[in-house]
Amino acid sequence: MMKKFFYRVVLFIIFTFLILPMLSMLIWSFFSNWRAIDILPSSFTFAGFNYFFASKDWYIGIKSTIFSMEVALIATIISIMVSRFLISTNIKNKNTLESIFYLPMLLPVISVCLGSHKLFLQSPISSTFALLILHIYFSLPYAFKMTYSYYSIWGVEEELTARGLGASFWQAFRYINLPIYIQGYIGSFIMAFIISYSQYFINLFIGNHNNINFSMIMTPYIANSNRNIAAVYTLMYIFYGVVVMMLTSLMGKNIARKKSLS
Amino acid sequence: MKKKKLLSLVLVFTLMISMVVFAGCENRAKQNQTVTLYGWGGDERVNAWIDNELGKYVKENYNITLKRVPMNIDEVLLKLTDEKSSAKSGSIDVIWINGENFYYAKKNNLLHGPFLNTLENAKKYYDLEGASATTDFGYATGGYEAPWGTAQFIFNYDSEKVKAIPTNAESLKEYVINNPGRFTYPKSSDFSGSAFIRTVLYDIVGYDKLKNLDPSYDTVKKVITPALEYLKALEPYLWKDGQVYPSDSAQLDSLYQDGEIDITMAYTANKALSMVKGKNWPSTTKTAVWEKGTPFNTHYLAISAIAPNVEGALKVINAALSPAMQISKANLDGWADLPSIKYEKLSQEEQGNLDKTLTPAKEYAPSILNYEELSKHQKPELKSDLVVIIEKIWEDVILFDK
Amino acid sequence: MISNIKKKRIQGILLILPALSIIAIVTLFVIINTFIESLGYIPELSFNSFTLKYYVDLFTDVVFLKSLYFSFKVALISAIVATILGVYTGYYVSKWSDNFTSLLYKMPILLSYVAAAVLIYNTYSDKGLLYHIISTLGISEVKVNLVYTDSGLGVILLNIFKGLPFVAFCVAPIFMKADETYSFVAQNLGCTRFQYIIKILLPLAKRSIVTSFLIIFNFNMFTYEGFYYLGPSNPISIGVYAYKTYLSPDLSNRIYGMAINMIMIMISIILCFLYYKMVKGHREGEII
């Protein structure tokens, strides 16, 4: 009995630790001052929100979110392709090949940007496309990790069986693969989205004035001393992200349910 | 049935990719009408002014779309250096710059110019031979940048906690000993921290002894040794016993806002007014300068050497120098940046407008110093390579205890 | 008439081509470019000679070595704590299907590092949220002194704040999967809950746990944003050190930056290699 209580307490402490900073963000979004001597913050204000919606920043946030969703979609599709290949081959250096796809996780973002800037400048690729490539570069390992772990558990045997019984590739994929794997695909989409959405340095350095990112706009404000504005921007940033995550989760649950019923 | 599904999937895919790729291409048509402005984006009042006032002005008068990109100046220069070395058309038009960064940019041929004396408003309203148009941190601008506004280094303090604000090094030392842990200053790598160190230098060593120093590490170190000893003596009485220095003025402001320290400092002379108005700072906040003078400088607009739209950039800068924009910029409710335009060259009406915008509302007047008071305690900046060496010496001696 | 095997092979290559090309090309270019620049050869900026001088300078600079050690120490502590607590949290998260909590714990991952750093500062700084909560609870005269300390505690908190949910997110699906398959069987055979966790769940998820640990350790060691805002002034971290060299007005400092980058890449590759060695023998019956 004591043991269970102890475990619950530890869990409670962990969650409090995670939530406290969020709480501080929520509080500071609505107040502009909180002196050390006061218990409660003073001066309730909507100034931060006014500024956020009056400037074009809320719209840039939406564009940013859509861009990251595109990146996540491409990263997920590519990682599905790679996972399917790896799961059905038996070449000698499978492990090495697999670890190649984890490489971007090891390189610091700044090194990659500074190092590849020259490559992109000298080629005819537009900066938006270069940006897309780099975002995919960093999101891919995370998406791949999630997808591959699902493929290693479930494999493609059932699909192959269905193909053997006469189903086409797409039929097998839609009716057999999707219902089982959809949670994994959604998970890897969300992971890729998160990584791309939080990228700041890439847009700063490689992108041009058409690729202004929410992170890029947000960072100078949060580095400055106006806590109200900083908190509002962080809140809206998380809000956009959460909306995307909830929508995709719901969609995933819907597909899984529909398929298993039909 | 299957073929249709496959086709639709491929179509969606191509659509997505093309959407992204063409997003880059489509804007090329608009490029003649777009001018980008790269500069620090941390102050929402500055950003609001640039977007709403300057942007609107150039759209109405020149049909130019001004795109502001928030980026720190050192990152801008890093990007520019890389872009220039690959000899492709760049993405940066106008740069908000001054001081060491301008020196670096000019030295490495990153700027377009000279252009200052081709601008209509510059010839009409500015003293093109004067100090701010011709020198930036001790070095010749050569017409490669246009003076946009001015700034003076000031101290903000809570007059309730600090009964007598120190206005020279001696009284600061007294204050710090009597109030241990209530004062600190940012690291030398920060603009404001560096300015504080220079203020101390102006007081202890004197501007005249410093202004023509040979920029070599050892010479400078020898001359500024008394000031270094002073700063070292201050250390144990500083916030956190001087073990940690705030990494920039924003952190210093946070400490002030939280009530951990009672004195903060910045290059924005009218900051206290908007902070008190927005209830971010206590209403008893006041502004002060040091007797022997605090650094006073100008900040500029320059054009990148590989700017895609040089004509547009020139028009935008011309607009920023116009009386209408200078007056609107000085508005105490907005940016409140001190103008760089020559007062005497303005018409009667314009002078009246400028005076009006620079006069604070009665209730907030005590928090800032008026312009006359400020100008009595102004000192020009030192040469930028000297500044860089002083910063490094502070780091080595005070921070790393070398 | 392409034979079936050949067709499969072509299909296979097409499958991995996009991913492989993006990753291989960018990675190779970056590593080669960084290596060449770190040797002092940047023709565009007129540095035209190859030299090891910069590496030698770095390794004999006490400040650099202290930064390296400091970054390593902070990264190790925060990665270990984050992994242990993350696995703990992941286990419980896998048991709940509550939508709200499962969304809540993922939020720190959503934030960029800078945003998270500022939130941590607002909460744990000397007069931040924690201080207000403590003083409201009536515990007076408590001094909160967590951020800005010499040990880099602020950065450790930040790394745990971001790393814990990440580890939880990675291991939760594994636990969920394993639970479905094994929990009933284990209970039937007489395992206690505790034994079940230690002897069955953990080894099954071992690979994922170790991978996550390496990822966050690597990230923590080389990032600069966290240290910039929350770290002490002395010593500074490697990431900050490198970042300062890129932005310094003296162009030759850029080469130091590239040399530091090369060292960071080397360390990462060594870590990856160690991981590979460790995992090589354990493929039987493992859930990845």
Image (cartoon, rainbow, N blue to C red):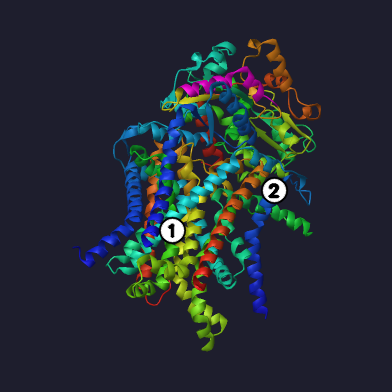
Q: Is residue C243 or residue B21 the one in the foreground?
A: B21
The answer, for residue C190, to whether it is visible in the render is no
* Magenta stretch contains residue B318: yes
Residue B343: image x %, image y %? Answer: 65, 14
Q: Which labelled disc corresponds to residue B281?
A: none
User: What's drawn in magenta, residue-wise?
Assistant: B311-331
Residue B257: image x %, image y %? Answer: 71, 42
Residue at the image position 51 percent from the left and 54 percent from the top: A194
Q: Quadrant of residue C99?
A: bottom right
The answer, for residue C75, to whether it is visible in the render is yes
Secondary-structure class at tag 1: helix
Q: Which labelled disc corresponds to residue A76?
A: 1
Q: Is residue B172 or residue B387 the one in the foreground?
A: B387
* Amino acid tagged 1: Thr
* Magenta stretch contains residue B290: no
| Residue under pointer 2 | A28
The earlier-in-sequence mark between 1 and 2 is: 2
Residue B79: image x %, image y %? Answer: 44, 36
